[in-house]
Amino acid sequence: MKKIYVPMIRYGDKEFDEGFIGWGFQSTEEQIRDAQAVLNIVSLERLKILDLACGLGSYHKVWLDAGHSVVGTDLSETFIMMAKNTNASAEYRVENFYDLEEENEYDLVTMIDTPIEDEDVPRNAFRALKPGGSFIFQISNPEYKHMRGQLMENRRTWQENEDRTFLLTRNEYNEEIDRWEYEEWNLNVETGDIVIEHHFSSNFTFSRMVDILLAVGFGSVSFLDADGRPYTTSKEPPKNYFCVAHKGKQ
Ligand SMILES: C[S@@+](CC[C@H](N)C(=O)[O-])C[C@H]1O[C@@H](n2cnc3c(N)ncnc32)[C@H](O)[C@@H]1O
């Protein structure tokens, strides 16, 4: 019996990226709302913006129309090619955000609908910003968890397919550390192979995120909703907050 592990999310793999376009991005309305929210937060003119993990860059039009200049980077050649076709006046490059080396170049660095999983991205963003610049990204709202429904339920299922393969799924959510794990085990009883597709994700708490941002050099940090209102515990919590970190004090 052979176990073959395959990550479920494989950005940069052409076939995966082409499929992802059909299901993985937020709706155009959500993207436009988020792009507008970023402008509500900074409300300055003629910014030089770097958007990390920009995907298709569909929402860059909002920033370009408002007079800003935009550089978009992403791991995926497929997404970057499409972004170039959509926004001729923006600049795009295929780049892993861990390889970003620019210094003192941008007024604003953004990352939309892409989780921060370590301190390397904040460190690179800090370096790329001009003094006085801001890093704005989304962080999932801990208050929203209980409303996430099925995704966060612990459940295991199995199913027999026509080709005599069996599919076992495992979905587990650990509330204490806010870690979600999902696995699909594809068992082929004839060959004995088990192909395991997996996806794990954990979120930093707000206070851990503040610690990371201050440690890499940011001077102040705040959490705002899409209308620019500060974080609050409310009955209808937003799914995400915008985390705004300034290079220097504000
Ligand atoms: C859910 S999509 C969001 C894309 C876009 N910001 C949006 O809101 O439509 C996540 C993006 O992160 C990109 N990505 C993931 N890891 C990356 C990395 N290490 N470097 C650059 N881009 C990355 C993926 O290619 C994908 O386009």
Image (spheres, rainbow, N blue to C red):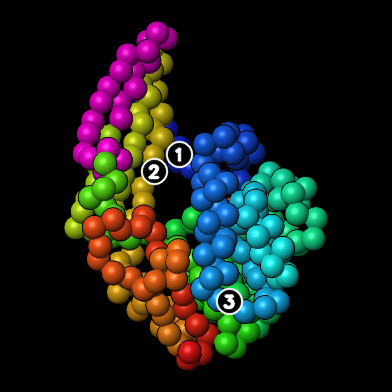
Q: CA distance from mark 2 to mark 3?
A: 37 Å
Element type at marker 1?
A: loop
Q: Residue 102 location, x and y as percent?
A: 67, 76
Question: Horizontal and vertical percent for residue 203?
Answer: 34, 59
Residue identified by numbered label 1: 8
From the viewer's perspective, tell me whether residue 198 is left or right of residue 105: left
Up-down relation of residue 95 to residue 85 (above or below): below
- Depth check: 168 or 109 in front? 109
> Are there few (<14), some (14-19), or many (20+) residues within 10 Å of tag 3?
few
Q: Secondary structure at mark 2?
A: strand
Residue at left 44%, top 58%?
Answer: 115
Look at the picture and state if 21 lies above or below 243. above
Q: Is residue 128 left or right of residue 242?
A: right
Residue 30 place in picture, x, y as percent: 51, 50
Range of the magenta residues?
A: 150-169
Quadrant in the picture for residue 139? bottom left
Dots 1, 2 in contact, CB < 8 A = yes
User: Is residue 155 shown in magenta?
Assistant: yes
> Which residue carries the number 3 mark?
43
For residue 225, the mark is none
Is residue 103 something that shows in the picture?
A: no
